[in-house]
Image (spheres, rainbow, N blue to C red):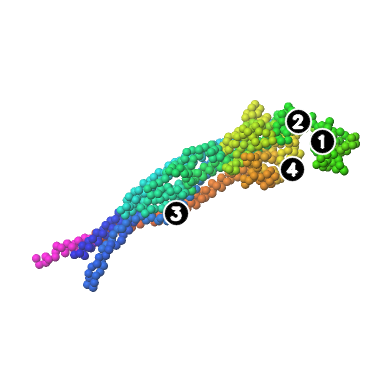
Amino acid sequence: MRATFSGLNTMVRGIMANQLSLDTTGHNITNAGTEGYTRQTVTLATTYSEVRPALFGDVMVGTGVDAQAVERARNIYADIQYRNENPTQKYYETMAVNYDKLETIFDDSKNLGIESALNKFYQTWVDLSTNASNSSARTQVIEQGRNVSEILQTATSELQDQIRSEYEDLKTEIKQVDDILEEILLFNKQVVAQEVTGATANDLRDRRDLLVDKLSDYMNISVSENEFGAYQINSGGITLISGMTRAHLEMSDGLSSSFFGVDYGVTDYNIKIKESNLVFLPQNGILKARLDSITEDKSYIDKMADIASFMLTAFNDQHKQGWDIDGHYKFVDEDGNTVDASTVTDDIPEYLDADGNYLTASDVEKSGTEYFNKNAQLYEDSGIYYRDDTMAEVVDADKVVYNAADDRFYIKATATDFPADTKYLDSSGNVVTKVPDTINFYGQDGMVYEYRYDADFKKNYLYKYDPADTVSSTNPNNKVNGEMLSGVQIIAALEVNARFAENRGDRYIAAATSYDVSETQNDDMSISREYINKAWGQRTGDGTNAVYLSELFNISQETIISDGKPNALVSKNLILRDLDGNIIDEKGNITTDSVYATTTASLSINSFYQKSMSTLGIDAYSTDVNYEGMQAIMTQVENWRDSMGGVDWNEELTNMIKFQKGFASCSRCLNAMDECLDRLVNSTGVVGR
């Protein structure tokens, strides 16, 4: 009797186990298309056996099956790899979109971009060099120069808009991350509450894991689980979630980009932890890609600023070395300082003594066939000549002439032949030079623009000052009322000089050269002050300075120096200087003019831009390749996860048939046992009635 009832219990357990398995299979099938769902299985185990007596001793009789748990078919190692690789894929995906936008901004496929504008500007100078007096050719130079500044400013404006768009996307994504963290925290609480009885909250865990996967889109994360089933999530050394508590992410208050050293004309933000007010720096994922995209966009504003700086410095310097069509000029002393023209005279000395000093006729006397400086009497002792009786400085005998008239020795002098229209004296009798008084092509008239390098920020700046505001002529680097320009400020300053807009403003174009190359280049290739001062109408080859200006587009400073050809003036503004005026080499170290001339090279403006665009193309291509590679890896990881946790219709239908058959078999067995029990109870003892 006991065995019969035990058999009933065994079949009941079988029916319940198969029913639970059927229910789980149905749950799997209905959620086959649910995002984040993990296939569930029923874990079955045999129940304890029952001891029964038999003819030859006790036997162990099975009592059926029991459902221990309904579990997820989840591969935690696949989860770890997914969350390690997914941020990298999202990083490259986001960066690729930004590079696509950059390539659109600098697209020159229709000859409407920056490279085309520079080439057209270059060509107008080439044309002007052969037709320098033509007003139409000169106007074309001005218009193409204006086109260069406008297209650089337009590209910069588009870069600023792109940076602002990146920040807006970042704000939205930070809000999404904060919402995800809040939902994960909520599921942490629900999972702990449901599993306190020992059951596994599979569906809640699926939804929580899906949120964690989405969180890995935005940043690199590491996930661990405590003994109660709650997740702890860390990122970049910051604990975002710990059990029942979490950190809150938010955008910082905006700061002008100039606060960080360079003015990009935008408001910058950081990601911070609200509770601690610490800056959060994601190491991967979409958030890092946003920040890196902003940095990349700013680097191209820097490149636009470098082009603008070149135009405001080296290009302006070369332009000011030439004569304009009206032949405006000024006088400068040997230090380059402007001298009041009203104090200048062309009463030039006709003699030069052996020490190289200019003399007036009244200072010179003749002794026989030789001249001497009568104000430079020497002291003689035993055939050696001295400046004075202190006998401190010996004078070379070749510089000495004897005057028999007074039986004394003097410094020798020679007659000279200086053209009266090329040498001038100031009111103190110092020799001054007549040079062109030509305007800046770009920027404000009368202003000087210089490169400056800030070692703290490792950035190029542009120093703008009025030469009239020097503190002293002996300290030309000590300027007052100067202004340090950076980033978009430099680009905004790249405006064609307003004087070109005057009536017949094209006459200010300095197309003619103002110096004789063969006589005026010093050995170190620096600019000599010996200018040829012919009026426009007296000049030949009046487009030479236009040639030099055109060559600045394609020739590097290294070429100018190394081949010894004065294709263009070597401007000091081609050399970076720090805030104190010291020369900076390509490694950021202070150096000297002579060292710089032999060790440092600079690109031409066209080469610089082409190199920048080549870099952009390579970076964009590399990002696309990396993204495609990460897609292949992620496909592999997702297939790995799906192979274990995904719902397979064929497998589930097979299971459904199996459990249905099991359920039916247990039911029929239960019916058979019920018939036996019925016969036993109701028919025993009634035989023979």
Residue position marked by numbered label 3 in the rendering: 81
Label whose residue precedes the other's in the sequence (4 or 2) = 2
Q: Nearer the viewer, mark 4 or mark 3?
A: 4
Q: Residue at x 47, y 44 (%)?
A: 278
Q: Residue at x 68, y 39 (%)?
A: 571
Label whose residue precedes the other's in the sequence (1 or 4) = 1
Is 589 situated left or right of 621 in this image?
right
Residue position marked by numbered label 2 in the rendering: 428
Query: Which stretch appears magenta?
Result: 668-689
Q: Quadrant of the N terminus?
A: bottom left
Badge 1 crowding class, 10 Å Cα cut-off, few under 14, some 14 to 19, many 20 or more, is: many
Q: Provide the secondary structure element on which disc 2 rests.
A: loop
Label whose residue precedes the other's in the sequence (2 or 1) = 1
484 versus 181 height, above or below = above
Type of secondary structure dominating the magenta stretch: helix
Q: Alpha-carbon distance for marks 4 and 3?
A: 66 Å
Residue position marked by numbered label 4 in the rendering: 523
